[in-house]
Image (cartoon, rainbow, N blue to C red):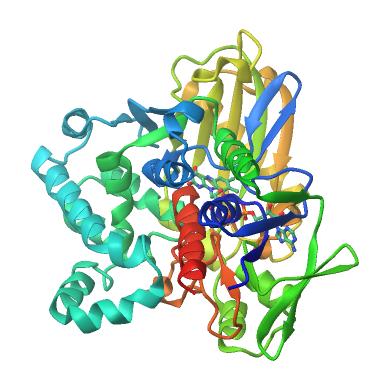
């Protein structure tokens, strides 16, 4: 068996695939168009501040522990993580402020005190989320889609029980309305739709596995910031023998008779019989394979991308002790906000604002007496909007919301600013229309439509990343890389 593999892209999915394959005895060459590795999980410095440019919250850290362990590394030695006591501080439009403690008894008490929902309601909901996660994880998260038919052949009754327990026919919002009386509780749990870049009024209630991931397993941050994840993966991969070529865009994948023959990059052709694409699936079909005809190529041309984001990276003078590491300022009309993002494809008039401050746990990320604010607003994917103008409009709305809710001047305390729009996300990672989580899950069967990690059309082509199975978000893209690696090893 030819043991040379090319990986296109050094997002967390690409790095995970490369490391896992090299650990399994393959020789991996990883090509990355940027001068740096990590893709969306990037890092930037400016004005004395350091910012993680993309993800801010780590869930399922055991995925990275397993990946590194297979390579002979203890994650706690190279990438210690810290469990957050307060996962997020929620500021509701009616003035209610609720701390989402990671301790289940404390958060249940917080809901009892601040909402009209009873501890029994919250417990019943957490149990339902845990059951769904336990049922779905092996079939839909940790393994290849290829294994599902065999599972159903061998365990038909169990398979049917799992599918019917996934609550596919209700929306996320619909299920929360059934569990809770208080509209603030409903809004808090509806927000998890944004973890897959989707709309809570459309996405199936199956996504309720996420509250279990966050409250049952826990929410974490690496002590040295999210940037530690791609850095450790790239360093470990290099130490194991992966050759990482940064600044080398792959222009096309060479195919002969539907067999992978190699890649073309920087005017050179390099032969490979196996290629893992960590590039966006639709980009892979359109530009790397020049394929507009196979079933998956046509499907990905039509599937709705996930939402995108405008992010303000602000260096702030002063310390805001009323804020936690993660803070959400909810809009007063969530339904309208999602209608604007997904149906009207316009930026929300009154956005929900997420503020993440890593200098609260990584003091070196900001000069003394200052904080580094990562301020994110969900917006539609790029359909040609004037993003410069939109960013200025959103900035004014965000400042108005934050200053009114915190009753403090923020505008005058911004001493550094950089802005990222959906266009910048596209430029940086070539994700479809600047989407941040691959495809949206706004339809009942979206999870089943995802690109499997092994191509059925091209022998030797594999996919790893947020737009392929099992989906977006750091632990899932790492799983996607590990599943692709496992399929290559299986041959
Ligand atoms: C603002 C923001 C906030 C987020 N918040 C969270 C969060 O809190 N928690 C969480 O878990 N997830 C979060 N995510 C999502 C998470 O970042 C992504 O799901 C994940 O990092 C995507 O990894 P990936 O493997 O799909 O690759 P990507 O990060 O998309 O990287 C793909 C890489 O491939 C390279 N590439 C593409 N085409 C080529 C080519 N032709 N040749 C060479 N190289 C190529 C690109 O340059 C890029 O480096 C967030 C994302 C963003 C943008």
Q: State the image quarter where residue 132 is shown.
A: bottom left
Q: Residue at x 32, y 76 (%)?
A: 148
For residue 260, above or below residue 127: below
From the viewer's perspective, tell me whether residue 200 is left or right of residue 157: right
Q: Is residue 67 left or right of residue 465?
A: left
The residue furthest top is 368
Q: Residue at x 77, y 51 (%)?
A: 245
Report x, y in % for residue 437.
Answer: 53, 57
Note whether residue 445 is visible: no
Q: How many marks?
A: 0
Task: Determine whether, in the image, residue 141 is placed left or right of residue 375.
Answer: left
Name the side, left or right, on which 490 lies relative to 394.
Answer: left
Spot occupied by residue 161 in the image (x, y as percentages of width and height): 15, 73
Which image quarter holds the N terminus?
A: bottom right
Tell me if I can see residue 309 in this picture: yes
Residue 68 at x, y percent in the picture:
47, 42
- Residue 7, above or below 294: above
Please tell me which residue lies in front, 68 or 350: 68
Identify which residue is drawn at 65% across, 36% down. Answer: 312
Residue 202: quarter of image: bottom left
């Amino acid at each position: 068996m030819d043991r040379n593999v090319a990986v296109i892209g050094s997002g967390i999915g690409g790095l995970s695939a490369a490391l896992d394959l090299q650990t399994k005895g393959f020789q991996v060459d990883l090509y990355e168009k940027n001068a740096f590795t990590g893709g969306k999980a990037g890092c930037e410095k400016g004005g004395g501040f350091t910012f993680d440019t993309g993800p801010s919250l780590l869930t399922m850290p055991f995925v990275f522990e397993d990946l590194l362990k297979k390579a002979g590394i203890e994650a706690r030695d190279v990438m210690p993580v810290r469990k957050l006591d307060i996962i997020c501080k929620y500021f509701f439009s009616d003035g209610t402020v609720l701390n989402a403690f990671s301790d289940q008894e404390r958060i249940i008490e917080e809901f009892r005190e601040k909402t009209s929902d009873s501890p029994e309601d919250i417990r019943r909901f957490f149990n339902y989320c845990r059951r769904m996660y336990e049922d779905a994880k092996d079939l839909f998260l940790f393994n290849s889609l290829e294994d599902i038919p065999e599972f159903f052949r061998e365990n038909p009754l169990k398979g049917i029980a799992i599918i019917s327990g996934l609550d596919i026919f209700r929306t996320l919002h619909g299920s929360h309305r059934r569990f809770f009386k208080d509209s603030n509780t409903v809004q808090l749990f509806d927000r998890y739709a944004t973890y897959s870049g989707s709309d809570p009024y459309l996405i199936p209630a199956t996504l309720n596995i996420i509250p279990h991931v966050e409250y049952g397993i826990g929410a974490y941050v690496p002590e040295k910031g999210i940037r530690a994840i791609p850095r450790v993966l790239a360093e470990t991969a290099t130490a194991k023998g992966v050759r990482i070529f940064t600044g080398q865009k792959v222009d096309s994948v060479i195919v002969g008779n539907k067999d992978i023959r190699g890649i073309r990059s920087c005017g050179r052709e390099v032969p490979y019989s196996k290629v893992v694409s960590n590039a966006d699936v639709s980009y892979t079909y359109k530009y790397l394979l020049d394929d507009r005809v196979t079933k998956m190529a046509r499907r990905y041309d039509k599937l709705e991308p996930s939402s995108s984001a405008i992010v303000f990276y602000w260096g702030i003078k002063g310390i805001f002790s009323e804020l936690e590491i993660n803070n959400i300022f909810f809009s007063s009309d969530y339904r309208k906000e999602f209608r604007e993002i997904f149906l009207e494809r316009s930026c929300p008039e009154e956005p929900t604002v997420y503020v993440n401050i890593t200098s609260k746990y990584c003091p070196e990320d900001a000069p003394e007496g200052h904080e580094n604010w990562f301020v994110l607003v969900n917006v539609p994917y790029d359909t040609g909007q004037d993003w410069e103008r939109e960013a200025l409009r959103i900035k004014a709305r965000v400042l108005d919301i934050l200053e009114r809710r915190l009753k403090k001047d923020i505008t005058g305390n911004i001493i550094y600013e950089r802005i990222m729009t959906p266009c910048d996300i596209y430029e940086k990672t070539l994700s479809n229309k600047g989407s941040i989580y691959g495809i949206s899950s706004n339809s009942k069967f979206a999870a089943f439509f995802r690109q499997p990690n092994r191509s059925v059309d091209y022998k030797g082509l594999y996919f790893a990343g947020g737009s392929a199975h099992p989906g977006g978000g750091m632990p899932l893209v790492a799983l996607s890389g590990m599943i692709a690696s496992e399929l290559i090893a299986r041959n």
